[in-house]
Amino acid sequence: MAGLVALTIGYVLSQFYRSFLAVLTPALTSELGATKAELSMASGAWFVVFALMQFVVGVSLDRYGPRRTAAFLLAACGGGGAVLFALAQTPWAVILAMALNGAGCSAVLMASVFIFAKTFSPARLAILISWLVAFGTLGNVIGSAPLAEAAEAFGWRWVMAGLAAVTILTGLAIGFLVRDPDPDPDVGPGRKGEGFGFRGYLELFRLRVLWPILPLTALNYAPAAGIRGLWAGPYLADVYGADALLIGQVTLFMALAMSVGSFVYGPLDVIFRTRKWVVFFGNGIGAAAVTWLALFPVPGIAATTILFVVIGVCGASYGLMMTHGRAFLPPHLTGRGVTLLNFFSVGGAGVMQFVTGGVVAAASAPGEPAAAYQTLFIFYAVLVVITLAIYLTCRDAPPETKRR
């Protein structure tokens, strides 16, 4: 239990680091001269490095176990990236710091999912993952209004230095407290070495049952992550003239919504006896909220906040999508399977950070700040609708079954 608490704290830090840039946008722009494109690159670097590390993390989980994998990466890379951020003097230093930190945070959630998948029944997996994500999403909350107030009081460099210390200590706690699960009894002696390295991913890609699940896995989180972690700050500042404290308040509501959404999604597959349709209709409502912003990009602060809340709640289907995909994974590839799904989830969000930076830059018009963000919301809406259409063709995996 103490080990899972340490991993949960690590995941809170991971959620913080992927979303805090929106609040620090004014400070980084004024002090370091960071442009929107550079901040987009910094945020995208975190997600892309995090995503690419999933292949390394997957092999490491199956080979070395969750304890050593998560402890080393969080302490060395996560803490090191936070230290570099605190010392940054240029936008490129911020980009490098975010990339290093992304590598450091890449294993904490997957270590927990690995332990859940090896220890608990498949029927409980959605609740366990969703509620872990819900608790972890408190990092989004810390990275909103509380961060804005702390940065205002102490300066963002001192705040980041303190977070670096907390990150390193959490990594050390994981190393001392986490216990690796026993080997999977379903995997016979003749299969323990099968697909032991990166070749195991080729076996996973041959599972056609996963193909229609992967596109939505890659993009269902992108609007919530992109708006909360990157575009809420510039959008509110450019369109409404919001300062850091107002941005922090709006993003606080969205962060709380993302946490609540994970709690809500958790038991729904058991209640409705389906994973596919809970995911489909939940993300359909989120797509409708994004579409509303695309049609009416300046609805007012109150309406914008409500729409951000809806997007946050509906975009929190990560745990359920992971459980849907996990139902089709062979036992000997559990570590690589869950990290492959996580690669698509975080990698899709990361790629969208880069892509949306270009979308906003290309659509910017002098004297019309809302035009760029309207194009951004249209872009998000179209992508989610397309992936939902593909997801309609996938096979369901009700919670009482474990299919392969």
Image: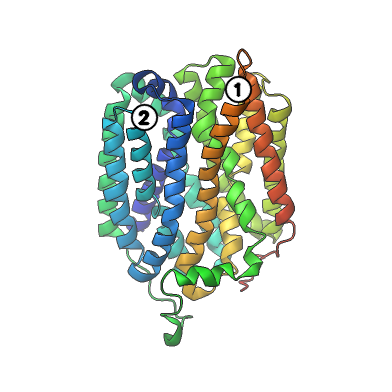
Please tell me the numbered disc located at residue 364: 1
Residue 88 drawn at (x, y percent): 29, 30
Which quadrant holds the C terminus?
Answer: bottom right
Please tell me the numbered disc located at residue 91: 2
By what rule are the colours in the image chosen?
Answer: rainbow
- Please, what is the three-letter code of the amino acid marked with disc 1? Ser
Q: Residue at x 48, y 30 (%)?
A: 37
Q: Residue at x 54, y 28 (%)?
A: 232
Q: Within 10 angstroms of label 1, few (less than 14), some, or many (20 or more) residues?
A: some
Residue 161 drawn at (x, y percent): 26, 33
The one nearer the camera, 253 or 334, is 334
Q: Residue at x 34, y 45 (%)?
A: 100
The quarter of the displayed image where residue 297 is located: top right
Which quadrant holds the N terminus?
Answer: bottom left
Residue found at the very far bottom of the displayed protein: 190
In this rendering, position of residue 238 left or right of residue 288:
left
Of the image marks 2 and 1, the number of the one nearer the N terminus: 2
Q: Would you place residue 330 above or below residue 69 in this image? A: below
Residue found at the very far front of the displayed protein: 362
Q: Within 10 angstroms of label 2, few (less than 14), some, or many (20 or more) residues?
A: many
The one nearer the camera, 361 or 117, is 361
In this rendering, position of residue 354 left or right of residue 216:
left
Residue 400 in view:
no
Q: Residue at x 40, y 52 (%)?
A: 106
SS label for mark 1: loop
Residue 246 in view:
yes
Circles 2 and 1: CB atoms closer than 8 Å: no
Measured Cα–Cα span from mark 2 to mark 1: 22 Å
SS label for mark 2: helix
Residue 336 drawn at (x, y percent): 47, 66
